[in-house]
Image (spheres, rainbow, N blue to C red):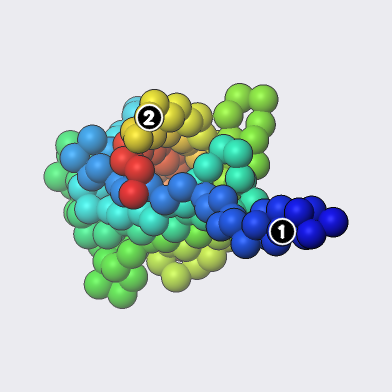
Amino acid sequence: MLRTLLATAAILAAPAAFAQDWVLDREASTVGFETTVFGQPASGEFSEFDAAITLDPEDLASARIEATVTVSSGTMGNRDYQTALRSPDGLNPAAHPEARFVSDDVTATDDGYEARGTLTIRGQETEAVLPFTLQIDGDRAVADGELTVDRSAFGVGGSGWGDVGEQVTIRLHVEADAG
């Protein structure tokens, strides 16, 4: 009886398993986007972004993703498009310097994972689902995800944006090391 009590006490005193924290490798990671302008594909990327990631596939209840993008770092191959992107009618970095995604829930799917949470662009919040794949090899994780948003839901675009597609696809490639 005493041995059972001691064994039970030892199990209860053992530290609980914690979800894995990941440190973003900014050099190997990318945040890009694509839409259409005059019916033709137009793409760009953001060079400044960060993420705080806690994720262990064996403990998804503890998973959390919080990512930010510095919107003034957005670039496009066409100078006019880039100017519009950074304008007050565009992402308006002067008033809204960051876009942000914060997960509420991460779940496994048949194709990988989904992070459900809140996406904030230009101060406008909307619920978003980010499907992504994840490969973990030792202390290195690689994730790829893509979500499509309606730019007008965030107030992006002015009266002269009629030839710009409403849908914007955001593509993420994230590489991180165990922290």
Q: Is residue 113 above or below residue 137?
A: below
Q: Is residue 131 above or below residue 64?
A: above
- Direction from residue 156 to residue 45 in the image, left or right: left
Q: Which residue is mark 2?
A: 138
- Direction from residue 89 to residue 149 in the image, left or right: right
x and y, in percent, of residue 22 in the image = 37, 47
Name the residue: 47% across, 35% down: 146
SS at badge 1: helix
Q: Tell me, yes or no, if residue 52 can be seen here.
A: yes
> Is the residue under label 2 in contact with that under label 1 (CB below 8 Å)?
no
Name the residue: 71% across, 58% down: 6
Tag on residue 6? 1
* Number of residue marks: 2
Alpha carbon distance from label 1 to label 2: 35 Å
Label 1 neighbour load within 10 Å: few <14, some 14-19, many 20+: few
x and y, in percent, of residue 28 in the image = 23, 35
SS at badge 2: loop
- The residue type indicated by label 2 comes to Gly
Viewer-nearest of discs 1 and 2? 1
Q: Is residue 18 above or below residue 76?
A: below
Nearer-the-camera pick, 24 or 152: 24
Extreme-bottom residue of the structure: 95
Q: Tell me, yes or no, if residue 67 can be seen here.
A: no
Q: Quadrant of residue 91?
A: bottom left
Extreme-front residue of the structure: 2
- The residue type indicated by label 1 comes to Leu
Name the residue: 35% across, 35% down: 139
Name the residue: 51% across, 34% down: 132
Label 2 neighbour load within 10 Å: few <14, some 14-19, many 20+: few
Nearer-the-camera pick, 9 or 45: 9
